[in-house]
Amino acid sequence: MPELIDAPAPSQSAGSDQPNLNALERSLRKPRTFFSVLLSILATLLTIIALVPLFSVIFMLFYRGGSNLVASNFWNLPPAPFGEGGGFGNALVGTLVMVGIASLISVPFGILAAVFLAELGPFSRTANVVRFCAKLLSGFPSILAGVFAYSAVVLVTGGFSAWAGGIALSILMLPIVILTAEEAIRMVPSKMREASIGMGATHTQTVLRILLPTAMPSILTGVMLAIARAAGETAPLLFTALFSNYWIVTNNQLDLNQPTASMAVLIYNFSGVPFENQVQLCWSASLVLVLMVLVVNLVGKSLSSRAPQR
Amino acid sequence: MINVQPNLAMDNGPNNPKDSETVIQCDLKELHYGAFKAVRDTRIPIRKGEVTAFIGPSGCGKSTVLRCLNRMNDLIRGFRFDGNVHFRGRDIYHPGVDPVAVRRYIGMVFQQPNPFAMSIYKNITYGLRINGYRGDYDEIVEKALRGAALWDEVKDKLRQSGLSLSGGQQQRLCIARAIAVEPEVLLMDEPCSALDPIATRKVEDLMSELKEKYTIAIVTHNMQQAQRVADRTAFMYVDTTQGGRTGYLVEMGETGQIFEDPTEQHTRDYISGQFS
């Protein structure tokens, strides 16, 4: 019966009542329509309210920090009260050095721990303990990392130093690196793992030649997240690196065994002083620190977009 | 061809001179995943220079048994194997045997084409590099790609990613990668189920060529495929009488005999399409 196949829709409704077209109209008198519209408006409104403090912080940063930011801020030392000019050059270098030390410690240990968690003994008791500790540490109060490094490094070596600051920051970075790298290695399609094992590769060869290269963009994203977190930390540095009004480099020699300035501690110190020039510098330093973290985050994002799709 | 002398630990298992044609003798008593008994009572010989097909309904354990032959199941948590698999007279489940060495001689092609995220050239040389082989890679790459009937299609783009190829080409790349190390046996786990009919045809033609050099065992859902490519066919079925779903070997024989004159009723029902 070709005519039935060609026109199934009319044949179904033929003979039955015409639908009531009024029922198609949107009406707020219907309770579920009313609630739907009401909740949509509410959700939009609350989103806007939630964004107000976020945008006002960013606006203030750019307005107060941007208006006085000059290039010489980047290579001058912090000014004395009532002084002219000055900058946060030593704090910028100090932050970079200490975050660098923290990365050198946390990235190798973190990736190796992630390889263990994802590949060597994912269901072992050790793995469960390590995973639990890493999750616990990722929400660890940063001041406790500072106190730990104070007792473990500052008291032992006899003074505040960039080393102690870097070690304190590495404690905060380590769990982020471990957990994101484990996830990244797990995300490598298991068919690639099987292909390598099936070719007669050992576990180590599979990890080094297939899993880590494939997971590397996502691992680096995790490293960037960890760096972004460490760069903004203040509390751990107060106990370990303290602050300094001088350069970390003296006589062309990088000295990591002395108190070291950092952006976060500079902001902390200058935000509470009554001297206008130091407060101004504090705003500029805040803006620069936020932009640094933003750049690191953007780099991490661009790396993760290169990660292989599952 | 490289003279293959598997460096496997010796074992006192049977080395029956009558089975000189048999490259792999699988004597599986029971196979468990945790508490789940997946396969029982399956004895399958894989004979040299032949294509052996494993057919049967889903869940009958045919892929599981195939993956036992080069110890790929070792990767699965809770896997337990009772029985032996003799490869050239040596039990590959003997504690002294390194599964990594076994897989060097018993290669595998998977259901999903799985080239590495590296160039075609590096995909082929992967097996050589991990085995520490130094020498003329170019020659081996060309030979492997010709062997997998892929050379003409990719000879101008060896540096491109293996993932840039079509599905059928990727699967032939995986076959080329597997034969680059000149294994004795090639295990193929539903190698055509992710491919279109034309690519399937190419891989099937390839199997007929490859069996002159390599012994092949293939799992397939497609009974016509088994009839087209296999010399001998093993039919497996699921036993649900003991509460679980345990697969077992119903019968095995020449492909023609299995499809035209099976001895078991289960086989007869399955190949005529009457399965419950």
Image (cartoon, helix red, strand yellow):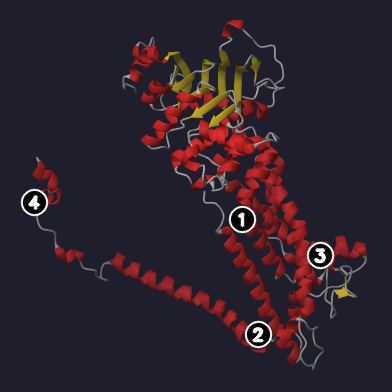
Which numbered disc covers residue A14?
4
Same-chain check, marks 2 and 3: yes
Same-chain check, marks 4 and 2: yes
- Mark 4 nearby-residue class (10 Å; few <14, some 14–19, many ≥20): few
Same-chain check, marks 4 and 3: yes
Q: Earlier in the sequence, mark 4 or mark 2?
A: 4
Q: Chain of mark 3?
A: A
Determine which residue is flagged by label 2: A65
Q: Earlier in the sequence, mark 2 or mark 3?
A: 2
Q: Position of residue A243 (x, y in %)?
A: 83, 76
Decide if residue B226 is in sight here: yes
Disc 3, disc 1: CB below 8 Å?
no
Q: Position of residue A70 (x, y in %)?
A: 69, 87
Q: Give the Cα separation between the discs numbered 1 and 2.
A: 34 Å
Which numbered disc covers residue A217?
1
Determine which residue is flagged by label 3: A147
Tell me: residue B276, above or below residue B11. Answer: below
Decide if residue B244 is in sight here: no
Q: Give the Cα separation between the discs numbered 4 and 2.
A: 73 Å
- Mark 1 nearby-residue class (10 Å; few <14, some 14–19, many ≥20): many
Tell me: residue A272, above or below residue A33. Answer: below
Q: Chain of mark 2?
A: A
Nearer the viewer's eye, disc 4 or disc 2? 2
